[in-house]
Amino acid sequence: MTYKELDFSGLIGTAGFSDKLLQAHFKLYSGYVANTNKAIELLKTLEPGTPQWAEIKRRFGWEFNGMRLHELYFGNMNKEKSSLPEDSALFKKMVATFGSGQACHENFVNTGKLRGIGWVVMCYDKQADQIFNVWINEHDVGHLAGCVPLLVMDVFEHAFVTDYGMDRAAYIKAFIDAIDWKVVQERFEKA
C-alpha cells in the first residue's frame, strides 16, 4: 500500500490564510505522506526486533498521524464561511455535552490557546455518546483510543506564524471562520 498525497490546493485564497502559508503547509504535509511510505518500505527490509526496526516502528506513528491529521485539518476547512445548523445532530450533541453550542466553541478555542505545540481535536466517543475537545501534544501522543476525530485544528507554529507571528488567538479566529461545518457534521453522522 502506498499512500497518495491529497490535493488541498482548492484552499488557496481562503480568508485569513496567505497563499505562502498554505503552500508551505501543503509541502510539510507532502513530507508526511512521503515519510509514511518510506517507513512502510523500510520496515519490510529490516529484521524485526533489531534496534533499527524498533526505531522505524516507533517513528511510523509520528509520520502516519502527521499525514492523517493534516488530511483531517485541511479537509475540515473551506473558503466559504459556514455554520452548523442548530437542529443538526452534532449541534444537539455539543449542547448535551457542554451545555450550549457557545460553551463547546469556547472550550475548543481555549484548548487551542494552551501553551505548546500540537493539535486540537473535537472527537466523538460513540461508546459514551459524548464529545471531547482534546489536546494532542505531538502527532502520536494524546489521542483518545476509539474516538472519532470530527474537527481538527493544527496549532503547531508552522500553521500560523507566517501570517500571525505568535498571535495564536488571531489564527484560531481565522481557522474558526474557515471551518466547513458540513464536513464536520458528516464525520459525526458516519461515527
Image: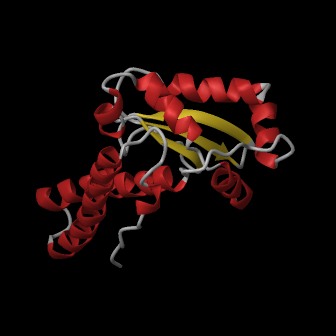
Report x, y in % for residue 168: 41, 25
Whether residue 139 is visible here, answered yes or no, is yes
Whether residue 147 is visible here, answered yes or no, is no
Judge from the rendering whether residue 127 lies leftward or rightward of residue 166; answer left or right: right
Q: Which quarter of the rendering shows the N terminus?
A: bottom left
Report x, y in % for residue 98: 74, 27
The answer to whether residue 37 is above or below residue 135 is below
The answer to whether residue 165 is above or below residue 54 is above
Q: Residue at x 68, y 38 (%)?
A: 131
Q: Residue at x 57, y 36 (%)?
A: 176
Q: Residue at x 74, y 43 (%)?
A: 84
> Which quarter of the picture shows residue 6?
bottom left
Q: Residue at x 44, y 21 (%)?
A: 114
Report x, y in % for residue 13: 44, 51
> Which quarter of the picture shows residue 122?
top right
- Front-most of residues 23 and 54: 23
